[in-house]
Image: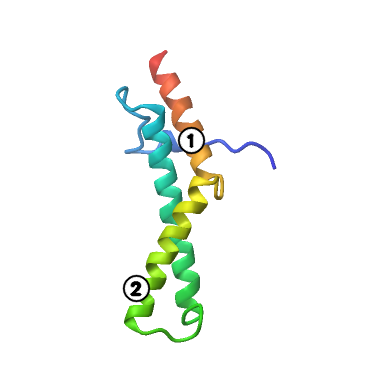
Amino acid sequence: MGSMAVSPLLSMPGATAPAKGDTPEKVRDAAEQFESLLVSQILRSARQTDGGWLGTEDAAGECATDYAEQQFATVIAKQGGLGLANLIVKGLEAGNKGREQ
């Protein structure tokens, strides 16, 4: 797979590079949270399309499944997940370097 560029996203209206006070750790954490949210939404969409992972669920089961999906998505994102967090961080760092020059 070739390298993917995120820098065009920075030219979109409203998109900005990290503020000078943002540490690399804060940027990485925000990117991982975004990826976690995206993975969680994908899991939720898949579950709702088929009527649940185990068939029909009651309200308590749905709440527990939502929580489990969120936790699973967080772990996936922390472990590298889909690679979106890395792309976001690289794109924001490149945008930030361009702003400093």
1 w.r.t. 40: above or below: above
Of mark 1 and mark 2, the one earlier in the sequence is: 1
Label 1 neighbourhood size at 10 Å, few (<14), some (14-19), many (20+)?
A: few
**Which of label 1 and label 2 is nearer to you?**
2
Does 50 sit left or right of 60 as displayed? right
What residue is drawn where x is 39% and y is 20%?
A: 99
What residue is drawn where x is 48% and y is 66%?
A: 43
Q: Quadrant of the N terminus?
A: top right
Evaluate if marks 1 and 2 touch, with contact meaning CB atoms under 8 Å apart: no
Q: 79 or 21: which is nearer to us?
A: 79
Dot 2: element: helix
Does 25 sit left or right of 75 as displayed? left
> Label 1 is placed on what type of residue?
Pro
Q: Quadrant of residue 71?
A: bottom left
Observer able to see residue 6: yes
Real-space Cα separation, disc 1 to disc 2, in angstroms: 38 Å
59 w.r.t. 2: above or below: below
Q: Which residue extends farthest top? A: 101
Query: In the drawing, what numbered circle is on residue 8?
Result: 1
Q: Quadrant of the C terminus?
A: top left
Label 2 neighbourhood size at 10 Å, few (<14), some (14-19), many (20+)?
A: few
Q: 61 or 34: which is nearer to us?
A: 61
Residue 19 coordinates in the image, percent (x, y): 31, 27
Residue for badge 2: 63
